[in-house]
Amino acid sequence: MTKQELFNNILQKQSFLCVGLDTDIKKIPSHLLRESDPVFAFNQAIIDATQSYCVAYKPNSAFYESLGAKGLISLEKTVEYIRENYPGQFIIADAKRGDIGNTSEMYARAIFESADYDAVTVAPYMGEDSVKPFLIYPGKWVILLALTSNKGSQDFQLTADTKGERLFEKVLKKSQEWANDEQIMYVVGATQGKMFEEIRRIVPHHFLLVPGVGAQGGSLEEVARYGLNSQCGLLVNSSRQIIYADKTEKFAEVAANEAKKVQQEMANYLKWIPSAK
């Protein structure tokens, strides 16, 4: 999916919502445990209920890997279901890969050849040769970790060199030598607030994947105020607030209502973009 196609979808749906499929079998409604594949049954219902209000889905691979082979089957079925039924959705593999040489090439092959994701999250710590194997696939995206929303982000990401340049700033600047804003996005946590202003000075045209809104306490209004650009430039992820909003047999209906609330708020913020009116 191209950057323009993604922006077109955002305009059409008046939404820049990404629904995180962090599906934990211990948290899904108990009645689904009677299904042959409870995880997929949950995902299918969530996807059908929310697809009108979002432009992306982000399965977190750890939740599926924790179940062994059957979890990976559930994940594969989930990606295939989205592709077949809602082909306009942008699908992100939240896998946080980051290795070098043949290992990175195999990760890239798994994400973009064996599976059919649009993008994958990648840790940039090992440098260019750990990222390049993901960038050889036309129409596919790398989403580099830049400034995350967790408490430990301060341990490394905000440390500065002798010139005062912080590590996350170095990541943003250096990575632009590897590919442009048609192939690289960045993860920036919603709890970083006004830091979006500083980030936008370095990467004014790139898309940002923003976790941390909702259950983690990030402000959607603040993210939009400081993070929007002329092509929206934001994919704001919400996981727990939507998918675990209810544990009864009405869980999908409640999830849809939660997604709709976020979408309606996003529609108001999109009015701030001249090209979105």
Image (cartoon, rainbow, N blue to C red):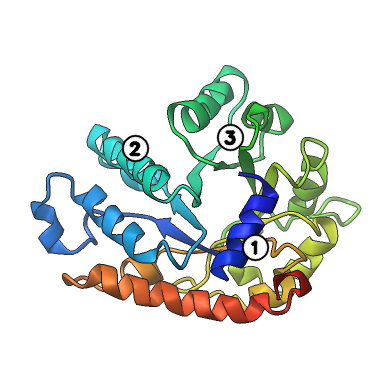
Q: CA distance from mark 2 to mark 1?
A: 26 Å
The spot of residue 102 in percent (x, y) is 57, 17
Q: Is residue 226 left or right of residue 140?
A: right
Which mark is on residue 234? Answer: 1
Looking at the rendered image, the disc whose residue lies closer to the viewer, 2 or 3, is 2
Q: Is residue 180 left or right of residue 37?
A: right
Which mark is on residue 163? Answer: none
From the image, tell me which residue sits under label 2: 76
Residue at horizontal 66 percent and vertical 45 percent from the top? 2
Which residue lies most toward the left here? 34
Q: Is residue 54 left or right of residue 26?
A: right
The spot of residue 270 in percent (x, y) is 66, 75
From the image, tell me which residue sits under label 3: 98
Density class for disc 3 (Cα within 10 Å; few <14, some 14-19, many ≥20) is some
Q: Disc 1 marks which amino acid? A: Leu
Q: Disc 2 marks which amino acid? A: Glu
Q: Quadrant of the C terminus?
A: bottom right
Q: CA distance from mark 1 to mark 3?
A: 23 Å
224 vs 89, nearest the viewer:
89
The spot of residue 47 in percent (x, y) is 35, 58
Chain-order first, disc 1 or disc 3:
3
The spot of residue 232 in percent (x, y) is 69, 65
Residue at horizontal 51 percent and vertical 74 percent from the top? 263
Q: Is residue 254 visible?
A: yes
Q: Are circles 2 and 3 on residues that touch, CB within 8 Å?
A: no
